[in-house]
Image (cartoon, rainbow, N blue to C red):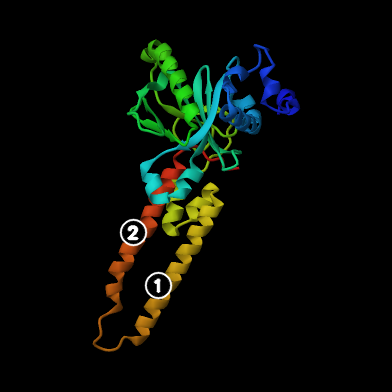
Amino acid sequence: MSSILRAATGYQDLLRLRDPQLPYRFDRIFAGKGMWARRLARQRFALLRNLEASLARALEPGERVELLSWGTEYSFVEAYFLGLWHHLLNRRALVLTDRRMLLLQIDTRRRLRDLKSEVRYEAMRRFARRTPGYLGLELRDGKKLFLTGLPRADRKRIRGFLEDRLRRSEQAARAALTGGRRNLCPHCYTSVSGFPGRCPHCARPFKSGDRAGWLSLALPGLGDLYLGHRALGALQVAGALLLWTAIGSGVWEASQKSGPGEASLAVLAIPLGVFFALGHGVDAWITRRTGKKGLYPAD
């Protein structure tokens, strides 16, 4: 952590700084008046201290942070199948610089986690359909990005900021070969295309979303443990083992009671197959989808 943030006792100390060489626009990050604005400023200060070491590595030469907020990257499918876990796994610190939007995964205490990605302003096409409580963006590669849980005051500021950037980046976007969201290496913060096994810059390994899916197909929760979601994975493994133990016990009792002329236990293959497809298959699909949301470090 830089000496400036370490020495600051609060965001007010940072507002007094006027050094144009600093990578932060503190006057914009902590802007606002009133009790609610001061409360948000204190939360941004705490978040910035958590992120500062990583931002020092991620920011490009001359790049400056303009706005800072937090929210949840929303997906209807994940919200439907994962419920509360969707909001826990997809919490993001939203860092708007003068060049791009950084999306950094954080936990409930707003501490940095593994996943990191960027969206260049020239990769943004327009705002998605306005929905109360959401900030939606349509990217030039056809994908959409929805954020929910942003403080209301931040939604207005961020929308105004992005509207200005969309206007200014339109000309640059016409010359861009590609436009969309790109993952950042969690080790060196280099932009990485696709999902390679290793970072092409620092050669550090990544975990595989496909492997996570196969593990969860074998037993729900194993893929989540592999990705590092220990609490979710442990609950799913325990639940799956308990359920399969109960099923196995029921099959054993039925086999002991069956006699000559009674229906074969082979008829249980169909319901067991359906259960495996729905329970294991759906969890494998969701886990693979989660593993493809970014680059998980393998060490």
Which amino acid type is shown beneath numbered disc 2?
Ala
Q: Quadrant of residue 278?
A: bottom left
Quadrant location, the N terminus:
top right
Residue 204 against residue 165 in the figure, above or below: below
**Regarding mark 2 in the picture, which secondary structure is present there?**
helix
Percent x, y of residue 16 = 69, 16
Percent x, y of residue 196 = 48, 36
Label 2 belongs to which residue?
Answer: 277
Measured Cα–Cα span from mark 1 to mark 2: 15 Å
Q: Which mark is residue 247?
A: 1
Task: Residue 200: tell me if it is visible.
Answer: no
Percent x, y of residue 282 = 37, 53
Percent x, y of residue 14 = 68, 21
Q: Depth check: 276 or 72 in front?
A: 72
Count all numbered tags in the image, as a single digit.
Answer: 2
Please tell me how crowded label 1 is: few (under 14), some (14-19), or many (20+) other residues with Cα within 10 Å. Answer: few
- Residue shown at the point (38%, 18%) measured from the top left: 177
Q: Quadrant of residue 37?
A: top right
Please tell me how crowded label 2 is: few (under 14), some (14-19), or many (20+) other residues with Cα within 10 Å. Answer: some
Please state if 266 lies on the left or on the right of 96 as rendered: left
User: Which residue, as the protein is rendered here, is positioned at the far bottom?
Assistant: 260
Task: Residue 66: tell me if it is visible.
Answer: yes
- Residue shown at the point (30%, 78%) measured from the top left: 265
Q: Depth check: 212 or 43 in front?
A: 43
Which amino acid type is shown beneath numbered disc 1?
Ile
Q: Which mark is residue 238?
A: none
Quadrant location, the C terminus:
top right
